[in-house]
Amino acid sequence: MAEPVLEVHDLRVTFDTEGGLVPAVDGIDFSVAAGQTLAIVGESGSGKSVSSAAVMGILPSNAEVKGEVLLDGRELVGLPSDELRKIRGNDIALVFQDALSALNPYYTVGWQVAEAYRLHHDVSKKAAFQRAIELLDKVGIPDAARRAKSYPHEFSGGMRQRVVIAMALVNDPRVLIADEPTTALDVTVQAQIMQLLADVQEEFGTALVLISHDLGVVAEVADDVLVMYAGRAAERGTVRDLFHRAAHPYSLGLLGAMPRIDVPPRPRLTTIPGSPPSPGSIKTGCPFQPRCAYTERVGERCITERPELTPRPGEGDHEAACHLGRRPEAVV
Amino acid sequence: MSSAELLRLDGVRKYFGLRGAPWRTGQTVKAVDGVSFVVRKGETVGLVGESGSGKSTLARVATRLLDPTSGRVEIGGKDVTRFRGRRLRPVRRTVQMVFQDPQASLNPRQSVGTILSTPFRAQGTRPTRAQLIELLHKVGLSEEHLERYPHEFSGGQRQRIGIARALAVSPDLLICDEPVSALDVSVQAQVLNLLADLRDELGLSYVVVAHDLAVVRQVASRVAVMYLGTIVEEGPSDQVYAAPAHPYTKALLSAVPVPEPGVTRDRIVLTGDVPTPISPPSGCPFRTRCYKAEDVCATTRPVLEPVNGQTEHRAACYFPEPPPS
């Protein structure tokens, strides 16, 4: 296994709100190596987006971050903001879900990509603009030299997402974090963008952290997967571990709940009863327990004792946080 | 003769005039540009397409929430194209709509009881408490929810309330506009199963408008694919998904990621974006992105014609895909 570029250990994020302290991320670990893709999967409130924002150091001031975030072995948590600013956008970059709000409507896209470059490179405006055109061309914007002088509103949703990706890539980052990069896009455009990210990764050896709720996209691009539930890791392993040997009832439930086009429709989809809990609402035991079909078989333990990640059969480091020792079978 | 027609659209067009900026005045957006479409009793028809394809506008014309610019809308065998106000009441008893975003389509200042009473009052009746409780039971909620307000519910529960409201007047046809796209995967499956249960219990028919092809595959027996305001292909779901005839359908299906690691799909990656419905291309609307386009495609718009002699499965293309061997 290649040396990881980004390592996260025991990451905890707590928000200080009017309603008290809310633990949004409650101790997660992950790592990703150059050229590899880690997918973080979860539903609303699972803490997947907060985790990526914590890694980038862009959480609001009422958030407290604990744990380790190591970029090439260098600790990012607790770094002074001017130090962090040198790293952010340069060594590690973020692609947002909503390209329209990530771009400034008052400036041309070329200017914005150039500005991202000038923040980290001492070059003339003209040279930076040339670099911007080069990147816009690379991400597949036709007639990039002319389109660089256009404003965000003159682009379609897919083209805007390309601009945001160009901006993220302009400094050749070692790690790219993409938070639901295709959720707002149509499926044909999604295919274009995922292809673009794969090409970029191959060319530059970028480590990619993909935050997604779409298991289809995950199956296609990820090497490793981390399934999050209520701010915790429910399961992690290789993409084949998750899709062929899911060991956590929640992962299994997600797979069963998803309609698919490659198999004939089932009379009913498997469902997970209830809905995802709000962060911090479950204090003891397993956070998934109220919705879990296996609780009865395990008994009290699920309610009283918080399950830790333990090894499961599979490739490499397949782990799940569940008291049910053996593999759950599909409940119909 | 097949079973009764609940909904028939004939050559429906819906154009929106642009206003505001001076350079836009006088231009029209051709949101729906000549659609004919039938829904029979007991059917679930999926209406799929990408943003800007006109699928939501079509749904709103079909429920007579919008007036068509031209064409005919028949509901329950009756021409209701020009109906307005009080005359629409019986139409509302036949066709109801479920909206995408339950957060936006429920009034936050009304209790669930008030929300569910509104359709009755619109029909000039008053519901009994027992009727309201029965509605909640139908969608998997209970009496205790009657006095609560929308913010006290999760997204999935709110969508159930939206469905209960649509069921209040005992309609025959529900038109659901992206009913699950705002929901988490685990909750999405609950709502899709609920729609299937209601179909079996109440004999409902559905039009499900969605951009998610897997969702439509799961619920629909028949599917219509829209592109730039027109239907480019329609037919039984099994046939359309297994053997798409229109190049757009084929590209669209090939773009859907499959949750099976290691399976690489033969993907047709379309170039460019959907053209603007202000000035759609001449001839076939898809020709500017089509990998099969030839000169003839730019001249006249192709019409829906049977695929491989099957009258149920039709596509609007001069060069339809051959069936897979």
Image (cartoon, grey):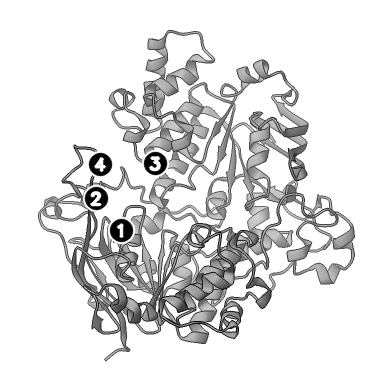
- Element under disc 4: loop
- Element under disc 3: helix
Q: CA distance from mark 2 to mark 1?
A: 9 Å
Query: Could you say which disc has been placed on residue A158 in the image?
Result: 3
Q: Amino acid at mark 3?
A: Gly
Q: Is A237 placed above or below B151 here? A: above
Name the image quarter holding the C terminus of chain B: bottom left
Are tags 4 and 1 found on a single chain? yes
Query: Could you say which disc has been placed on residue A191 in the image?
Result: none
Q: Earlier in the sequence, mark 2 or mark 1?
A: 1
The image shows a total of numbered marks equal to 4
- Tell us which disc is closer to us: 3 or 4: 4
- In this view of the protein, which residue sits in the foreground, A220 or B216? B216
Name the image quarter holding the N terminus of chain B: bottom left
Question: Would you name the residue on which mark 4 appears?
Answer: B20
Are tags 1 and 3 found on a single chain? no
Q: Chain of mark 1?
A: B
Q: Earlier in the sequence, mark 4 or mark 2?
A: 4
Q: CA distance from mark 3 to mark 4?
A: 26 Å
Q: Is A177 placed above or below A281 here? A: above
Query: Could you say which disc has been placed on residue B277 in the image?
Result: 2
Are tags 4 and 2 found on a single chain? yes
Are tags 2 and 1 found on a single chain? yes
Q: Earlier in the sequence, mark 4 or mark 1?
A: 4
Query: Could you say which disc has been placed on residue B54 in the image?
Result: 1
State the residue at coordinates (73%, 65%). Answer: A291
Q: Is residue B189 among the parts visible in the rendering?
A: yes
